[in-house]
Amino acid sequence: MDKPSPGLVRSHCVGTTAVVYASDYLNKLTGERIERECRRQLDCGCRALVIDFSDTQLVNSIGISILLGIIDVAEKSGARVVFSEVNNQTVELFEMLGLTRHVALAKDEHEALLNLSSYETMRVVH
Amino acid sequence: MEPSTQKLIHTFGALADLGQEIAGTGDFTEMVRTSLHLLLGTLALRRGAVAECVDAGALSCVALWGLGDRVLRQFAIAESEKQSLLVAQERECLVRESETGFISRQREGLLREEIELVVPMIVRGEVTGLVLLGGKASGEEFSAADFDTIKAMVRHIGVGIHTHRLLEQVAQRAEENRRLYEELRAIYRDTVRAFATAIDIKDKYTQGHSERVGRYSALIATEMGWSEEEVEGIQIAGYLHDIGKLVVDRDIINAPYRIDAKQSSDLNKHPEAGYEILSPINHPYADIPLTAKYHHERPDGRGYPDGLTDEQIPLGAKIVSLADAFDAMTTDRPYRRRRSFEDVVRDLRENSGTQFDGKVVAAFARAILKEVNGASKKRPITKMLGKDYLQGEHVATLLSDLISELDDNARNAARATTSAGSE
Protein backbone atom coordinates (compact mmCIF):
# COMPACT_ATOMS: atom_id res chain seq x y z
CA MET A 1 0.00 0.00 0.00
CA ASP A 2 1.28 3.48 -0.84
CA LYS A 3 2.38 5.74 1.96
CA PRO A 4 -0.51 8.06 2.90
CA SER A 5 -0.07 11.55 1.50
CA PRO A 6 -0.23 14.51 3.92
CA GLY A 7 -3.74 14.55 5.38
CA LEU A 8 -3.68 10.81 6.02
CA VAL A 9 -5.69 9.54 3.04
CA ARG A 10 -5.07 5.84 2.51
CA SER A 11 -4.50 4.76 -1.07
CA HIS A 12 -2.71 2.15 -3.15
CA CYS A 13 -2.28 1.32 -6.80
CA VAL A 14 -3.18 -1.85 -8.71
CA GLY A 15 -1.64 -1.47 -12.13
CA THR A 16 -2.93 1.80 -13.48
CA THR A 17 -5.83 1.88 -11.06
CA ALA A 18 -5.65 3.90 -7.83
CA VAL A 19 -7.74 2.77 -4.87
CA VAL A 20 -8.48 5.67 -2.53
CA TYR A 21 -10.21 5.14 0.81
CA ALA A 22 -12.77 7.67 1.95
CA SER A 23 -13.07 8.37 5.67
CA ASP A 24 -16.01 7.88 8.05
CA TYR A 25 -17.68 11.24 7.33
CA LEU A 26 -17.14 12.73 3.91
CA ASN A 27 -17.28 16.47 4.60
CA LYS A 28 -15.21 19.42 3.46
CA LEU A 29 -11.99 18.61 5.25
CA THR A 30 -11.88 14.91 4.42
CA GLY A 31 -13.42 15.47 0.98
CA GLU A 32 -10.72 17.91 -0.02
CA ARG A 33 -8.01 15.50 1.13
CA ILE A 34 -9.51 12.73 -1.01
CA GLU A 35 -9.87 15.09 -3.97
CA ARG A 36 -6.18 16.06 -3.69
CA GLU A 37 -5.18 12.41 -3.50
CA CYS A 38 -7.26 11.53 -6.58
CA ARG A 39 -5.76 14.42 -8.52
CA ARG A 40 -2.29 13.30 -7.46
CA GLN A 41 -2.97 9.75 -8.64
CA LEU A 42 -4.33 10.97 -11.98
CA ASP A 43 -1.30 13.26 -12.41
CA CYS A 44 0.89 10.21 -11.78
CA GLY A 45 -0.73 8.44 -14.74
CA CYS A 46 -3.56 6.42 -13.20
CA ARG A 47 -6.27 5.59 -15.73
CA ALA A 48 -8.94 4.60 -13.23
CA LEU A 49 -9.99 5.47 -9.69
CA VAL A 50 -11.70 3.25 -7.16
CA ILE A 51 -13.03 5.24 -4.23
CA ASP A 52 -13.72 2.87 -1.40
CA PHE A 53 -16.49 3.87 1.01
CA SER A 54 -16.22 0.89 3.38
CA ASP A 55 -15.46 3.25 6.30
CA THR A 56 -17.94 5.92 5.26
CA GLN A 57 -21.09 6.36 7.29
CA LEU A 58 -22.25 9.69 5.93
CA VAL A 59 -21.75 11.96 2.93
CA ASN A 60 -23.00 15.54 3.21
CA SER A 61 -23.62 18.17 0.51
CA ILE A 62 -20.03 19.31 0.50
CA GLY A 63 -18.95 15.70 0.08
CA ILE A 64 -21.26 15.36 -2.93
CA SER A 65 -19.83 18.53 -4.49
CA ILE A 66 -16.29 17.33 -4.00
CA LEU A 67 -17.07 13.87 -5.43
CA LEU A 68 -18.57 15.57 -8.50
CA GLY A 69 -15.33 17.53 -8.81
CA ILE A 70 -13.36 14.27 -8.75
CA ILE A 71 -15.64 12.77 -11.40
CA ASP A 72 -15.18 15.89 -13.53
CA VAL A 73 -11.40 15.79 -13.31
CA ALA A 74 -11.35 12.05 -14.00
CA GLU A 75 -13.59 12.45 -17.07
CA LYS A 76 -11.36 15.21 -18.41
CA SER A 77 -8.36 12.89 -17.95
CA GLY A 78 -10.18 10.04 -19.70
CA ALA A 79 -10.14 8.01 -16.48
CA ARG A 80 -12.98 5.85 -15.10
CA VAL A 81 -14.34 6.10 -11.58
CA VAL A 82 -15.86 3.28 -9.54
CA PHE A 83 -17.32 3.67 -6.07
CA SER A 84 -17.00 0.56 -3.95
CA GLU A 85 -18.63 -0.72 -0.77
CA VAL A 86 -21.09 2.17 -0.51
CA ASN A 87 -23.72 1.71 2.22
CA ASN A 88 -27.41 1.56 1.24
CA GLN A 89 -28.29 5.02 2.49
CA THR A 90 -25.45 6.59 0.53
CA VAL A 91 -26.32 4.54 -2.58
CA GLU A 92 -29.84 5.97 -2.41
CA LEU A 93 -28.41 9.47 -2.09
CA PHE A 94 -26.04 8.98 -5.05
CA GLU A 95 -28.87 7.58 -7.16
CA MET A 96 -31.26 10.35 -6.20
CA LEU A 97 -28.71 13.04 -7.10
CA GLY A 98 -27.59 11.37 -10.32
CA LEU A 99 -24.02 10.56 -9.40
CA THR A 100 -24.55 6.97 -10.47
CA ARG A 101 -24.96 8.19 -14.07
CA HIS A 102 -21.26 9.01 -14.04
CA VAL A 103 -19.74 6.25 -11.90
CA ALA A 104 -20.16 2.52 -11.55
CA LEU A 105 -20.91 1.01 -8.15
CA ALA A 106 -19.20 -2.14 -6.98
CA LYS A 107 -19.90 -4.42 -4.03
CA ASP A 108 -16.29 -4.19 -2.87
CA GLU A 109 -12.81 -3.30 -3.99
CA HIS A 110 -12.21 -6.66 -5.62
CA GLU A 111 -15.35 -6.38 -7.73
CA ALA A 112 -14.43 -2.80 -8.61
CA LEU A 113 -11.02 -3.88 -9.88
CA LEU A 114 -12.57 -6.78 -11.83
CA ASN A 115 -15.13 -4.44 -13.33
CA LEU A 116 -12.38 -2.08 -14.46
CA SER A 117 -10.19 -4.86 -15.88
CA SER A 118 -13.09 -6.32 -17.90
CA TYR A 119 -13.81 -2.81 -19.19
CA GLU A 120 -10.17 -2.47 -20.24
CA THR A 121 -10.34 -5.89 -21.92
CA MET A 122 -13.55 -4.94 -23.73
CA ARG A 123 -11.94 -1.71 -24.85
CA VAL A 124 -8.96 -3.60 -26.31
CA VAL A 125 -11.20 -6.23 -28.03
CA HIS A 126 -13.46 -3.67 -29.60
CA MET B 1 -36.86 5.87 2.60
CA GLU B 2 -38.98 7.73 0.04
CA PRO B 3 -36.74 9.64 -2.41
CA SER B 4 -38.66 12.84 -1.75
CA THR B 5 -38.12 12.49 2.03
CA GLN B 6 -34.46 11.75 1.53
CA LYS B 7 -34.10 14.77 -0.75
CA LEU B 8 -35.79 16.95 1.86
CA ILE B 9 -33.47 15.73 4.61
CA HIS B 10 -30.44 16.26 2.37
CA THR B 11 -31.59 19.81 1.53
CA PHE B 12 -32.40 20.70 5.14
CA GLY B 13 -29.00 19.42 6.24
CA ALA B 14 -27.33 21.63 3.65
CA LEU B 15 -29.39 24.68 4.66
CA ALA B 16 -28.45 24.16 8.32
CA ASP B 17 -24.78 23.83 7.40
CA LEU B 18 -25.03 26.94 5.23
CA GLY B 19 -26.56 28.99 8.05
CA GLN B 20 -23.78 27.90 10.36
CA GLU B 21 -21.15 28.73 7.76
CA ILE B 22 -22.54 32.21 7.04
CA ALA B 23 -22.84 33.04 10.75
CA GLY B 24 -19.29 31.88 11.45
CA THR B 25 -16.43 34.28 11.97
CA GLY B 26 -13.85 32.27 10.07
CA ASP B 27 -11.96 33.11 6.91
CA PHE B 28 -14.18 34.92 4.39
CA THR B 29 -12.96 33.17 1.24
CA GLU B 30 -13.35 29.80 2.91
CA MET B 31 -16.85 30.74 4.00
CA VAL B 32 -17.89 31.52 0.41
CA ARG B 33 -16.12 28.46 -0.97
CA THR B 34 -17.86 26.19 1.54
CA SER B 35 -21.19 27.86 0.83
CA LEU B 36 -20.71 27.22 -2.88
CA HIS B 37 -19.92 23.56 -2.18
CA LEU B 38 -23.07 23.29 -0.09
CA LEU B 39 -25.16 24.78 -2.88
CA LEU B 40 -23.62 22.55 -5.55
CA GLY B 41 -23.85 19.45 -3.38
CA THR B 42 -27.48 19.99 -2.45
CA LEU B 43 -28.65 19.55 -6.05
CA ALA B 44 -25.53 17.78 -7.34
CA LEU B 45 -24.57 20.57 -9.69
CA ARG B 46 -21.33 19.91 -11.49
CA ARG B 47 -19.82 23.38 -11.43
CA GLY B 48 -20.42 26.87 -10.18
CA ALA B 49 -19.00 30.23 -9.22
CA VAL B 50 -19.82 33.06 -6.84
CA ALA B 51 -18.95 36.51 -8.17
CA GLU B 52 -19.29 39.99 -6.70
CA CYS B 53 -20.16 43.02 -8.81
CA VAL B 54 -17.30 45.47 -8.56
CA ASP B 55 -16.48 48.78 -10.26
CA ALA B 56 -17.49 49.41 -13.87
CA GLY B 57 -19.65 46.32 -14.01
CA ALA B 58 -16.77 43.86 -13.73
CA LEU B 59 -17.35 40.61 -11.89
CA SER B 60 -14.89 39.59 -9.22
CA CYS B 61 -14.74 35.88 -8.51
CA VAL B 62 -14.99 34.99 -4.83
CA ALA B 63 -15.25 31.21 -5.21
CA LEU B 64 -15.52 28.68 -8.01
CA TRP B 65 -15.65 24.92 -8.47
CA GLY B 66 -15.27 22.91 -11.64
CA LEU B 67 -14.50 26.02 -13.69
CA GLY B 68 -11.25 27.59 -14.87
CA ASP B 69 -9.74 30.42 -12.80
CA ARG B 70 -10.21 32.92 -15.57
CA VAL B 71 -13.77 32.09 -16.48
CA LEU B 72 -15.28 35.27 -15.04
CA ARG B 73 -12.88 37.67 -16.73
CA GLN B 74 -14.86 37.53 -19.95
CA PHE B 75 -18.10 38.68 -18.32
CA ALA B 76 -19.17 42.17 -17.26
CA ILE B 77 -22.60 43.37 -16.31
CA ALA B 78 -24.09 46.79 -17.12
CA GLU B 79 -26.14 48.77 -14.59
CA SER B 80 -29.29 48.40 -16.70
CA GLU B 81 -28.74 44.63 -16.87
CA LYS B 82 -28.58 44.50 -13.07
CA GLN B 83 -31.93 46.26 -12.96
CA SER B 84 -33.51 43.68 -15.28
CA LEU B 85 -32.08 40.84 -13.14
CA LEU B 86 -33.81 42.34 -10.12
CA VAL B 87 -37.17 41.46 -11.59
CA ALA B 88 -36.14 38.37 -13.57
CA GLN B 89 -38.44 35.38 -13.28
CA GLU B 90 -37.01 31.92 -12.72
CA ARG B 91 -37.01 30.87 -16.38
CA GLU B 92 -35.21 34.14 -17.24
CA CYS B 93 -32.27 32.87 -15.20
CA LEU B 94 -31.84 29.83 -17.43
CA VAL B 95 -29.04 30.47 -19.89
CA ARG B 96 -30.76 28.60 -22.74
CA GLU B 97 -34.09 30.35 -22.30
CA SER B 98 -33.31 33.93 -21.26
CA GLU B 99 -34.15 36.40 -23.99
CA THR B 100 -32.96 39.74 -22.66
CA GLY B 101 -30.24 41.37 -20.62
CA PHE B 102 -26.95 40.02 -19.34
CA ILE B 103 -27.70 36.30 -19.68
CA SER B 104 -28.91 36.57 -23.24
CA ARG B 105 -25.99 38.80 -24.24
CA GLN B 106 -23.46 36.43 -22.68
CA ARG B 107 -25.25 33.22 -23.66
CA GLU B 108 -22.54 31.90 -25.94
CA GLY B 109 -19.74 32.41 -23.40
CA LEU B 110 -21.79 30.98 -20.56
CA LEU B 111 -22.72 27.84 -22.49
CA ARG B 112 -19.12 27.40 -23.56
CA GLU B 113 -18.27 27.19 -19.84
CA GLU B 114 -21.21 24.77 -19.37
CA ILE B 115 -23.06 27.26 -17.15
CA GLU B 116 -26.80 26.70 -17.28
CA LEU B 117 -28.18 29.01 -14.62
CA VAL B 118 -27.30 32.56 -13.55
CA VAL B 119 -28.84 33.66 -10.25
CA PRO B 120 -28.51 37.25 -9.02
CA MET B 121 -27.48 37.85 -5.41
CA ILE B 122 -29.91 40.51 -4.26
CA VAL B 123 -29.32 42.35 -1.00
CA ARG B 124 -31.50 45.28 0.06
CA GLY B 125 -32.95 45.63 -3.41
CA GLU B 126 -29.58 45.70 -5.16
CA VAL B 127 -27.80 43.14 -7.30
CA THR B 128 -24.53 42.68 -5.41
CA GLY B 129 -23.26 39.72 -7.40
CA LEU B 130 -24.08 36.63 -9.42
CA VAL B 131 -24.01 32.92 -8.80
CA LEU B 132 -23.25 30.93 -11.94
CA LEU B 133 -24.28 27.28 -11.88
CA GLY B 134 -23.73 24.27 -14.10
CA GLY B 135 -26.26 21.56 -14.84
CA LYS B 136 -27.43 18.79 -12.53
CA ALA B 137 -25.41 15.58 -12.47
CA SER B 138 -28.67 13.73 -13.03
CA GLY B 139 -29.11 15.52 -16.35
CA GLU B 140 -32.63 16.53 -15.26
CA GLU B 141 -34.10 19.98 -15.81
CA PHE B 142 -34.30 22.37 -12.86
CA SER B 143 -37.64 21.93 -11.09
CA ALA B 144 -39.63 24.64 -9.28
CA ALA B 145 -38.43 23.14 -5.97
CA ASP B 146 -34.85 23.33 -7.20
CA PHE B 147 -35.32 27.03 -8.01
CA ASP B 148 -36.71 27.64 -4.52
CA THR B 149 -33.76 25.88 -2.90
CA ILE B 150 -31.24 27.73 -5.08
CA LYS B 151 -32.87 31.12 -4.44
CA ALA B 152 -32.90 30.55 -0.67
CA MET B 153 -29.27 29.49 -0.60
CA VAL B 154 -28.11 32.28 -2.90
CA ARG B 155 -29.91 34.80 -0.68
CA HIS B 156 -28.03 33.41 2.32
CA ILE B 157 -24.71 33.62 0.51
CA GLY B 158 -25.44 37.17 -0.69
CA VAL B 159 -26.27 38.36 2.81
CA GLY B 160 -23.15 36.63 4.16
CA ILE B 161 -20.92 38.40 1.64
CA HIS B 162 -22.68 41.73 2.18
CA THR B 163 -22.34 41.47 5.97
CA HIS B 164 -18.68 40.62 5.63
CA ARG B 165 -18.07 43.63 3.37
CA LEU B 166 -19.90 45.89 5.83
CA LEU B 167 -17.76 44.60 8.68
CA GLU B 168 -14.68 45.21 6.55
CA GLN B 169 -15.79 48.81 6.03
CA VAL B 170 -16.43 49.25 9.75
CA ALA B 171 -13.00 47.85 10.55
CA GLN B 172 -11.45 50.14 7.93
CA ARG B 173 -13.24 53.19 9.38
CA ALA B 174 -12.16 52.22 12.89
CA GLU B 175 -8.58 51.96 11.65
CA GLU B 176 -8.86 55.37 9.95
CA ASN B 177 -10.28 56.85 13.16
CA ARG B 178 -7.47 55.32 15.16
CA ARG B 179 -4.94 56.83 12.77
CA LEU B 180 -6.67 60.22 12.93
CA TYR B 181 -6.69 60.03 16.71
CA GLU B 182 -2.97 59.22 16.69
CA GLU B 183 -2.35 62.17 14.37
CA LEU B 184 -4.36 64.46 16.67
CA ARG B 185 -2.35 63.26 19.64
CA ALA B 186 0.85 63.91 17.72
CA ILE B 187 -0.38 67.41 16.85
CA TYR B 188 -1.27 67.96 20.50
CA ARG B 189 2.18 66.78 21.63
CA ASP B 190 3.92 69.00 19.06
CA THR B 191 1.80 71.98 20.13
CA VAL B 192 2.62 71.34 23.76
CA ARG B 193 6.32 71.13 22.97
CA ALA B 194 6.08 74.38 21.06
CA PHE B 195 4.47 75.90 24.17
CA ALA B 196 7.27 74.52 26.31
CA THR B 197 9.79 76.18 24.03
CA ALA B 198 7.84 79.44 24.26
CA ILE B 199 7.87 79.21 28.07
CA ASP B 200 11.60 78.59 28.14
CA ILE B 201 12.35 81.41 25.70
CA LYS B 202 10.91 83.81 28.23
CA ASP B 203 13.56 82.66 30.70
CA LYS B 204 16.88 83.11 28.93
CA TYR B 205 18.80 81.20 31.63
CA THR B 206 16.73 78.02 31.58
CA GLN B 207 16.43 77.17 27.91
CA GLY B 208 15.25 73.60 27.39
CA HIS B 209 14.17 73.35 31.05
CA SER B 210 10.53 72.42 30.36
CA GLU B 211 11.55 69.85 27.74
CA ARG B 212 13.99 68.24 30.17
CA VAL B 213 11.48 68.27 33.04
CA GLY B 214 9.01 66.49 30.74
CA ARG B 215 11.56 63.84 29.83
CA TYR B 216 12.82 63.30 33.40
CA SER B 217 9.21 63.01 34.58
CA ALA B 218 8.50 60.38 31.92
CA LEU B 219 11.57 58.38 32.94
CA ILE B 220 10.59 58.46 36.62
CA ALA B 221 7.00 57.43 35.82
CA THR B 222 8.24 54.57 33.61
CA GLU B 223 10.46 53.38 36.46
CA MET B 224 7.44 53.50 38.77
CA GLY B 225 5.56 51.17 36.43
CA TRP B 226 3.11 53.65 34.92
CA SER B 227 1.32 52.68 31.71
CA GLU B 228 2.46 54.03 28.33
CA GLU B 229 -0.46 56.46 28.23
CA GLU B 230 0.17 57.68 31.78
CA VAL B 231 3.84 58.20 30.96
CA GLU B 232 2.85 60.27 27.91
CA GLY B 233 0.56 62.31 30.15
CA ILE B 234 3.19 63.06 32.77
CA GLN B 235 5.64 64.04 30.02
CA ILE B 236 3.11 66.57 28.74
CA ALA B 237 2.53 67.78 32.30
CA GLY B 238 6.28 68.24 32.62
CA TYR B 239 6.43 70.27 29.40
CA LEU B 240 3.65 72.54 30.68
CA HIS B 241 4.43 72.76 34.40
CA ASP B 242 5.80 76.33 34.11
CA ILE B 243 3.24 77.65 31.63
CA GLY B 244 2.02 80.06 34.34
CA LYS B 245 5.34 81.88 34.01
CA LEU B 246 3.96 83.39 30.82
CA VAL B 247 2.03 85.83 33.02
CA VAL B 248 5.01 86.66 35.27
CA ASP B 249 7.07 89.78 34.49
CA ARG B 250 10.06 88.87 32.31
CA ASP B 251 12.37 91.03 34.51
CA ILE B 252 11.54 88.90 37.55
CA ILE B 253 12.15 85.65 35.69
CA ASN B 254 15.42 86.88 34.20
CA ALA B 255 16.71 88.78 37.27
CA PRO B 256 20.47 88.04 37.49
CA TYR B 257 20.29 88.38 41.29
CA ARG B 258 18.25 87.02 44.16
CA ILE B 259 14.76 88.51 43.83
CA ASP B 260 13.08 90.38 46.71
CA ALA B 261 9.98 89.26 48.66
CA LYS B 262 7.47 91.11 46.42
CA GLN B 263 9.04 89.70 43.26
CA SER B 264 9.17 86.25 44.86
CA SER B 265 5.47 86.50 45.68
CA ASP B 266 4.73 87.38 42.04
CA LEU B 267 6.83 84.48 40.79
CA ASN B 268 5.13 82.08 43.20
CA LYS B 269 1.80 82.79 41.56
CA HIS B 270 2.85 80.90 38.42
CA PRO B 271 1.49 77.47 39.51
CA GLU B 272 -2.01 78.85 39.96
CA ALA B 273 -1.73 80.91 36.77
CA GLY B 274 -0.70 77.71 35.00
CA TYR B 275 -3.76 75.94 36.40
CA GLU B 276 -6.00 78.77 35.13
CA ILE B 277 -4.45 78.58 31.66
CA LEU B 278 -4.63 74.78 31.41
CA SER B 279 -8.00 74.10 33.01
CA PRO B 280 -10.26 75.14 30.12
CA ILE B 281 -8.40 72.82 27.73
CA ASN B 282 -9.77 69.34 27.15
CA HIS B 283 -6.51 67.40 27.51
CA PRO B 284 -6.31 63.78 26.33
CA TYR B 285 -4.46 62.98 29.58
CA ALA B 286 -5.58 63.29 33.19
CA ASP B 287 -4.46 65.82 35.82
CA ILE B 288 -2.31 68.11 33.66
CA PRO B 289 -3.73 71.36 35.17
CA LEU B 290 -3.42 69.97 38.73
CA THR B 291 0.17 68.92 38.14
CA ALA B 292 1.02 72.48 37.04
CA LYS B 293 -0.78 73.85 40.11
CA TYR B 294 0.89 71.57 42.66
CA HIS B 295 4.41 71.11 41.34
CA HIS B 296 5.77 73.38 44.13
CA GLU B 297 3.92 71.62 46.93
CA ARG B 298 6.02 69.63 49.44
CA PRO B 299 5.20 66.51 51.52
CA ASP B 300 6.06 68.46 54.71
CA GLY B 301 3.35 71.03 53.92
CA ARG B 302 5.78 73.93 53.36
CA GLY B 303 5.14 74.25 49.65
CA TYR B 304 2.81 76.53 47.72
CA PRO B 305 0.20 77.57 46.62
CA ASP B 306 -2.00 75.54 49.04
CA GLY B 307 0.49 74.09 51.53
CA LEU B 308 -0.76 70.56 50.87
CA THR B 309 0.80 67.64 52.75
CA ASP B 310 2.10 64.29 51.51
CA GLU B 311 -1.09 62.34 50.76
CA GLN B 312 -2.88 65.41 49.43
CA ILE B 313 -0.34 66.00 46.68
CA PRO B 314 -1.04 64.12 43.41
CA LEU B 315 1.76 61.67 42.56
CA GLY B 316 2.22 63.34 39.16
CA ALA B 317 2.91 66.67 40.84
CA LYS B 318 5.50 64.97 43.10
CA ILE B 319 7.22 63.52 40.04
CA VAL B 320 7.31 66.84 38.19
CA SER B 321 8.46 68.58 41.37
CA LEU B 322 11.50 66.30 41.62
CA ALA B 323 12.24 66.56 37.89
CA ASP B 324 11.99 70.37 38.13
CA ALA B 325 14.34 70.58 41.14
CA PHE B 326 16.78 68.08 39.66
CA ASP B 327 17.05 70.09 36.44
CA ALA B 328 17.47 73.31 38.42
CA MET B 329 20.33 71.73 40.40
CA THR B 330 22.06 70.21 37.37
CA THR B 331 22.04 73.24 35.04
CA ASP B 332 23.96 76.51 35.23
CA ARG B 333 22.11 79.61 36.47
CA PRO B 334 23.18 83.28 36.12
CA TYR B 335 24.26 83.47 39.72
CA ARG B 336 25.82 79.98 40.13
CA ARG B 337 27.32 77.00 38.34
CA ARG B 338 25.49 73.68 38.39
CA ARG B 339 26.11 71.45 41.37
CA SER B 340 28.20 68.28 41.33
CA PHE B 341 26.38 64.96 41.23
CA GLU B 342 27.56 64.12 44.77
CA ASP B 343 26.06 67.38 45.97
CA VAL B 344 22.77 66.69 44.15
CA VAL B 345 22.52 63.19 45.65
CA ARG B 346 23.18 64.65 49.11
CA ASP B 347 20.39 67.19 48.56
CA LEU B 348 17.97 64.48 47.44
CA ARG B 349 18.81 62.32 50.46
CA GLU B 350 18.43 65.20 52.93
CA ASN B 351 15.17 66.41 51.43
CA SER B 352 13.46 63.09 50.84
CA GLY B 353 10.29 62.98 52.86
CA THR B 354 10.25 66.76 53.34
CA GLN B 355 10.63 68.44 49.94
CA PHE B 356 10.50 65.28 47.82
CA ASP B 357 8.60 62.02 47.99
CA GLY B 358 11.10 59.27 48.95
CA LYS B 359 9.57 56.69 46.58
CA VAL B 360 9.81 59.10 43.65
CA VAL B 361 13.46 59.89 44.49
CA ALA B 362 14.23 56.15 44.72
CA ALA B 363 12.61 55.53 41.31
CA PHE B 364 14.62 58.34 39.72
CA ALA B 365 17.83 57.03 41.31
CA ARG B 366 17.07 53.56 39.90
CA ALA B 367 16.52 55.02 36.42
CA ILE B 368 19.87 56.86 36.58
CA LEU B 369 21.65 53.78 37.97
CA LYS B 370 20.38 51.66 35.05
CA GLU B 371 22.14 54.04 32.66
CA VAL B 372 25.29 54.22 34.78
CA ASN B 373 25.72 50.44 35.09
CA GLY B 374 24.72 49.80 31.45
CA ALA B 375 21.47 47.95 32.25
CA SER B 376 19.64 50.42 30.03
CA LYS B 377 20.78 50.65 26.39
CA LYS B 378 19.19 54.04 25.86
CA ARG B 379 20.83 56.78 27.90
CA PRO B 380 18.53 59.83 27.79
CA ILE B 381 19.53 61.13 31.25
CA THR B 382 23.23 60.95 30.40
CA LYS B 383 22.49 62.82 27.16
CA MET B 384 20.63 65.59 28.99
CA LEU B 385 23.30 65.93 31.66
CA GLY B 386 26.29 65.70 29.36
CA LYS B 387 28.44 62.58 29.08
CA ASP B 388 31.01 63.63 31.73
CA TYR B 389 28.53 64.44 34.48
CA LEU B 390 27.84 60.86 35.55
CA GLN B 391 31.44 59.64 35.15
CA GLY B 392 33.29 57.82 37.92
CA GLU B 393 32.86 54.62 39.89
CA HIS B 394 31.53 56.53 42.91
CA VAL B 395 28.37 57.52 40.98
CA ALA B 396 26.94 53.98 41.03
CA THR B 397 27.82 53.63 44.72
CA LEU B 398 26.15 56.94 45.56
CA LEU B 399 22.98 55.88 43.76
CA SER B 400 22.93 52.35 45.22
CA ASP B 401 23.37 53.72 48.75
CA LEU B 402 20.60 56.28 48.20
CA ILE B 403 18.20 53.64 46.82
CA SER B 404 18.96 51.26 49.66
CA GLU B 405 18.44 53.97 52.28
CA LEU B 406 15.16 55.16 50.74
CA ASP B 407 13.87 51.59 50.38
CA ASP B 408 14.68 50.97 54.08
CA ASN B 409 12.83 54.16 55.00
CA ALA B 410 9.82 53.06 52.96
CA ARG B 411 9.81 49.61 54.58
CA ASN B 412 10.06 51.11 58.07
CA ALA B 413 7.27 53.57 57.32
CA ALA B 414 5.06 50.74 56.06
CA ARG B 415 5.82 48.68 59.17
CA ALA B 416 5.00 51.64 61.43
CA THR B 417 1.70 52.18 59.61
CA THR B 418 0.79 48.49 59.96
CA SER B 419 1.57 48.34 63.68
CA ALA B 420 -0.28 51.65 64.31
CA GLY B 421 -3.27 50.19 62.50
CA SER B 422 -3.25 46.99 64.57
CA GLU B 423 -3.06 48.84 67.95
Image (cartoon, coloured by chain):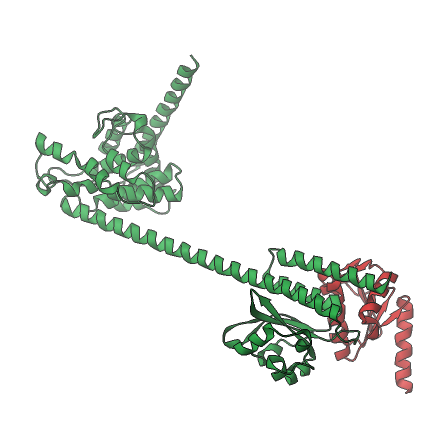
Residue located at (27% from left, 41% from top): B238
Question: In the visual, does B41 lie left or right of B295?
Answer: right
x and y percentages locating residue A105 in the rendered image:
87, 70
Q: Where B346 falls versus A67 (above or below)?
A: above
Q: Quadrant of residue B85?
A: bottom right
Question: In the visual, does B207 lie left or right of B16?
Answer: left
Depth check: give the residue in front, A17 or B409. Answer: A17
Residue located at (36% from left, 21% from top): B413
x and y percentages locating residue B199 in the rendered image:
18, 46
Q: Where B216 falls versus B262 (above or below)?
A: below
Question: In the visual, does B114 lie left or right of A123?
Answer: left
Depth check: give the residue in front, B76 or B384. Answer: B76
Q: Colour of chain B?
A: green
Q: Where A79 falls versus B41 (above or below)?
A: below
Depth check: give the residue in front, A34 or B149. Answer: B149
Q: Quadrant of residue B358?
A: top left
Q: Colour of chain A?
A: red
x and y percentages locating residue B5 in the rendered image:
82, 61
